[in-house]
Image (tube, rainbow, N blue to C red):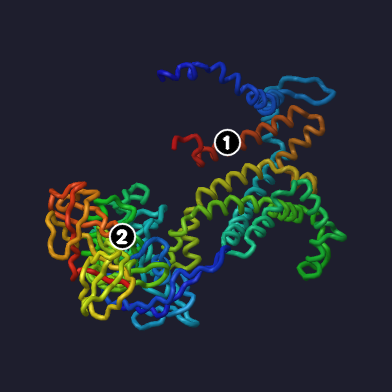
Amino acid sequence: MAGRGEVVTGGREAYFFIAPLLLFVFAFIVFPIAGTFFSSFFSDVTFMGKKFIFLSNYTHAFSDPGFRQAFGFTLTFIAVAVPLELFIGTAFAVILDQELPLRGLWRACVLIPWAIPSAVSARIWQLIYNYGYGLANFIAVHSGLADGPVNWTGTASGSFIALLAADVWKTAPFVALIVLAGLQAVPSDLKAQARVDRATSFQVFRLVTLPLLKPVLTVALLFRTIDTLRIFDVIYVLTGGGPGGSTTSVSLYAYNYFAGGDFGYGSAVSMLLFMVSFGLSWLYVRLAGFGEAA
Amino acid sequence: MNISLKSLKKDFTSARGKFTVLDSVDLEIKEGEFFVLLGPSGCGKSTLLNLLAGLEKPSSGEISFGGTLMAGPGKFTGPRGRNVAMVFQSYALYPHLTVFGNIAFPLNIAKVPKPEIKERVEKAAAMLGITALLGSKPGELSGGERQRVAIARAVVRRPDVLLFDEPLSNLDAQLRLATRVELKKLQRELGITSIYVTHDQVEAMTLGDRVAVLKDGKLQQLDTPMGLYERPANRFVAQFIGFPPMNLMDCTLTEEAGAMAAGIGGVRLVPLKKPGLKTGPASIGIRPSDIEVSREPVPGSVPVRIDLAEPLGRDILLSFSLAGTEVSALTGDAGLTEGREAHARLIPEKVHVFI
């Protein structure tokens, strides 16, 4: 490192320059997480004494039927919603990858749901699912799919389907966007070669395009899984976690405890969610190959 | 399989307007022939190859394989209906499959039974000397090895027609030479009608049984390699074929006592013996090897002053001005150095006249 010594030994100056960012990271990320972690060891309910109970909040969570219900719902929702999002998103990406007139316009249209804030789109879906004048019941009744109006948000299965539609509608465009980028990275020569090798259009997709999309689909899968794991806003607006807690996600469950003044238990639930998210994020970083020397 | 192209035309429409990439091309390619499409980039040769593969539809005209119409008015057979294999410039190996998987790909599509696939892939690999690579992924191979895999994948199908799109251009010079020889041998051995696209006239000359020269979507000339060299149909072919390129000179044809001659600005350059020539402006072409440069004047020679002498090994490439036109000539006389006065004579029998 001769000749560049001054620069290399300036480690202290380097910290000085990144200090604003470090400050931000500490204030808004590290400190809240550490704080939550710390709180999770206490029995800390508003107007009641704060008491160190170490892991009791965690042991309670594992036997708490409410937490189990929320955790089970969240996992079930991930298991159903994420594959659906990937399938629909990929299908849209394949359509948008074709030589269509006004392609730019179609692409923009598909992305609109992703651009609308969740709380706003959830309100729109709330109108759609309205028992008396909602579009969902209008279609269900007039198409003959249902004998009478369906109480969408009043039953567990109805709520699940309602949330599923709202969530997939909003997030499939995100999948479409990254899969489209992946599709455009597939060399056209390879597809032409497969066609000359007498593959049908479907075989070209299944045997050439899809395997080459695998890394992109893996990224989409992990992104969507992590994101769905902490699903909150759509549920909060549309069903409020009901009926009877059947659509309460882990995030919403933790939120309810915070809102009720039980900071200790809310923190413990949040930490459990954080740990699962962190594990998945770590997996994502590993699979995507970040930080590896090229 | 013989291939017939009739008034083949291909237009592309883009935001900037309509382009004619191929314009009324008529060709007859014979069974088992090694046919080369030669031309500069953008001449339409790759488009012609795509039309033959069925990857693109012609705007008009007909393509027939062995007498069966593949593309024509109201009829179009895609790649699935044609038994055509293709080797791309990029090799287009499937990166997620092993070498075995790549070579087996067309056979899997054709639903060939597994034991037969194994046998045929191994045979094709042995023929191209890549047996040891069957378990590797394309990413682990060198350019030359990838090339061989692409060729193995093309021949394993036993296609009726083999198409090559500049397959040697991504190889280094030495490997290109060796592969060229092998490719020609392989084609002779298999006897498959092959169409080879290149912009390299040396490749075209050495590989082709016949060569079609294309420029701006139009067929310039179709002949054997030696035919193109000896009887170029126009100025473009004359300059495109052969190295160093043919000298072209704008001159005037004159007639004296029933004998035609070409001259520039009053300097009589060379008598012309070709029948049917008319007096007036024309171009004459002569290859550098067909200009004799000597130290002493000879009958019919013109005095010149040598501007540049570039040794090529066996020959020396001389540049000088001949009646105001820069020309080059090959000589074996090392005494003809830069700045020397010399005498140049165009061999009359070797002069080409382009009107």
Residue behind mark 2: B200
Quadrant including the N terminus of chain A = top left
Q: Name the residue at 82% across, 25% down.
A: A46
Checking the image for residue A279, the label placed there is 1
Q: Is residue B257 above or below residue B304?
A: below
In the picture, measured across the screen, residue A226 lies left or right of residue B317, that is right
In the picture, measured across the screen, residue A122 lies left or right of residue B102, that is right
How many neighbours does mark 1 have within 10 angstroms: few (below 14), some (14-19), or many (20 or more)? few
**Parent chain of label 1:** A
Q: Name the residue at 33% across, 74% down.
A: B280
User: Can the viewer see residue B159 in this picture?
Assistant: no
Q: Position of residue A202 (x, y in %)?
A: 50, 65
**Parent chain of label 2:** B
User: Can the viewer see residue A212 in this picture?
Assistant: yes
In front here: B272 or A81? B272
The answer to whether tags 1 and 2 share a subunit is: no
**What secondary structure is marked by label 2?**
loop
**What secondary structure is marked by label 1?**
helix
Nearest to the eye among marks 1 and 2: give it: 2
Residue at far right of view = A132
Q: Tally the marks.
A: 2
Q: Position of residue A28 (x, y in %)?
A: 69, 28
Q: Position of residue B3 (x, y in %)?
A: 34, 77
Q: Is residue A197 above or below residue B312?
A: below
Amino acid type, label 2: Asp
Quadrant including the C terminus of chain A = top left
Q: Name the residue at 26% across, 69% down.
A: B262
In the picture, measured across the screen, residue A96 lies left or right of residue B314, that is right
Checking the image for residue B351, the label placed there is none
Amino acid type, label 1: Gly
Q: Position of residue B305 (x, y in %)?
A: 22, 52
